């Protein structure tokens, strides 16, 4: 039987070296890249970006002009971007709702595991049962649970160490549409070999491997980042990709306090590397985005403003205009 939680779905195979040439970050769609780029440099200001500038930036990741323009159009239809036209030229920015959602998402990514608080030992358990012929609905529910930070202890029993938030209750009820039970409970250790701790719902050795791969891969760029030798498009590509990879850990890792995890759990070191790269490349990446946008506006300066990890943690878009 295929395990419902497949680590390869969250971490597709990636190249061994940080981004140094035009290459789309592993696992990123053109639409996903568009949102990441626009959000990284305008989420706090909702500045208008010329469509030609967005296309040029996406080109640094190997996205063709046709694919880039298609992505922009689809995101506008989905309500993620809104457009403005002056003569033959069009510009786009994040909608208010998208800016708030992306800001909240950024906060969740960078605060997950940053300062793990003490844990009360209580698990949220979701138990569900659906007929075999409802395979599509079962898969949809599993995907919803996985991306909400749950993992399958058994096929129809998913667990999380965190309480189910009020908004999550409505989302789960809408997604399940069947027999589902949610409760909070403590694990009783039977002290026998057949006992399975809820934390074993996560593939801990595989998660450690992903953390170690991340640390090894991006640590190699730290000396150049500190020295200021990563500039221009290379800084943009590296900063975008390190976020693209790191953001998946908040889904992959159960985010329990270190004392509840195996000894030497590498979460803290991975976060240190992420912060050093993401913040360390802010200035050169921001300068490059500004230069591309200014070129496409004929010299007009736009309010392009990148943000640090601390900015994201505080919430960079609390009152969008």
Image (cartoon, rainbow, N blue to C red):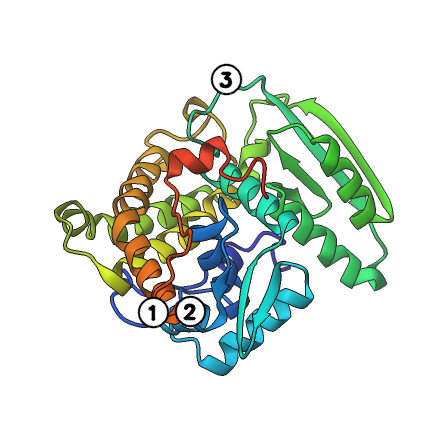
User: Alpha-carbon distance for marks 2 and 3?
Assistant: 46 Å
Asked if residue 19 is positioned above or below residue 117 in the image, the reply reads: below
Mark 3 Cα shell of 10 Å, populated few (<14), some (14-19), many (≥20):
few
Q: Position of residue 7 (x, y in %)?
A: 50, 54
User: Alpha-carbon distance for marks 3 and 1?
Assistant: 51 Å
Asked if residue 216 is positioned above or below residue 109 in the image, the reply reads: below
Do the CB atoms of the residues marked 1 and 2 lie less than 8 Å apart?
yes
Q: Position of residue 44 (x, y in %)?
A: 49, 44
Nearer to me, 219 or 11: 219
- Residue 12 appears in the rendering: yes
Residue located beneath label 3 in the image: 118
Q: Which mark is residue 53?
A: 2
Q: Is residue 193 left or right of residue 139?
A: left
- Residue 17 appears in the rendering: no
Q: Is residue 187 left or right of residue 11?
A: right
Q: Residue at position x 58%, y 48% from top?
A: 99
| Earlier-in-chain disc, 3 versus 1 | 3
| Earlier-in-chain disc, 1 versus 2 | 2
Q: Quadrant of residue 82?
A: bottom right
Label 2 secondary element: helix
Q: Which mark is residue 1?
A: none
User: Alpha-carbon distance for marks 1 and 2?
Assistant: 8 Å
Nearer to me, 63 or 128: 63
């Amino acid at each position: 039987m295929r395990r419902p939680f497949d680590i390869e779905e969250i971490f597709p195979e990636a190249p061994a070296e940080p981004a140094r040439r035009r290459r789309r970050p592993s696992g990123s769609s053109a639409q996903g890249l568009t949102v990441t780029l626009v959000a990284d440099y305008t989420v706090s200001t909702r500045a208008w970006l010329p469509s030609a500038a967005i296309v040029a930036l996406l080109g640094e990741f190997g996205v063709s002009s046709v694919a880039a323009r298609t992505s922009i159009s689809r995101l506008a239809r989905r309500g993620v971007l809104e457009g403005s036209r002056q003569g033959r030229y069009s510009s786009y920015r994040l909608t208010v709702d998208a800016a708030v959602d992306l800001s909240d998402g950024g906060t969740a990514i960078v605060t997950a595991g940053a300062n793990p608080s003490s844990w009360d030992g209580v698990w949220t358990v979701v138990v569900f049962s659906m007929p075999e012929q409802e395979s599509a609905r079962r898969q949809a529910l599993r995907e919803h649970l996985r991306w909400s930070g749950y993992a399958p202890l058994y096929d129809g029993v998913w667990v999380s160490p965190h309480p189910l938030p009020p908004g999550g209750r409505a989302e789960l009820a809408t997604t399940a549409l069947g027999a589902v039970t949610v409760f909070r409970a403590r694990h009783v250790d039977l002290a026998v070999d057949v006992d399975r701790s809820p934390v074993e719902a996560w593939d801990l050795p595989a998660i450690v491997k992903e953390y170690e791969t991340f640390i090894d891969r991006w640590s190699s760029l730290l000396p150049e980042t500190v020295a200021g030798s990563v500039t221009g498009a290379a800084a943009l590509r590296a900063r975008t990709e390190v976020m693209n990879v790191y953001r998946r850990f908040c889904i992959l890792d159960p985010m329990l306090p270190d004392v509840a995890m195996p000894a030497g759990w590498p979460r803290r070191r991975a976060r240190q590397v992420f912060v050093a790269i993401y913040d360390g490349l802010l200035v050169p990446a921001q300068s490059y985005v500004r230069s591309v946008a200014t070129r496409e506006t004929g010299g007009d300066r736009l309010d392009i403003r990148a943000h640090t990890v601390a900015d994201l943690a505080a919430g960079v878009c609390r009152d969008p205009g």
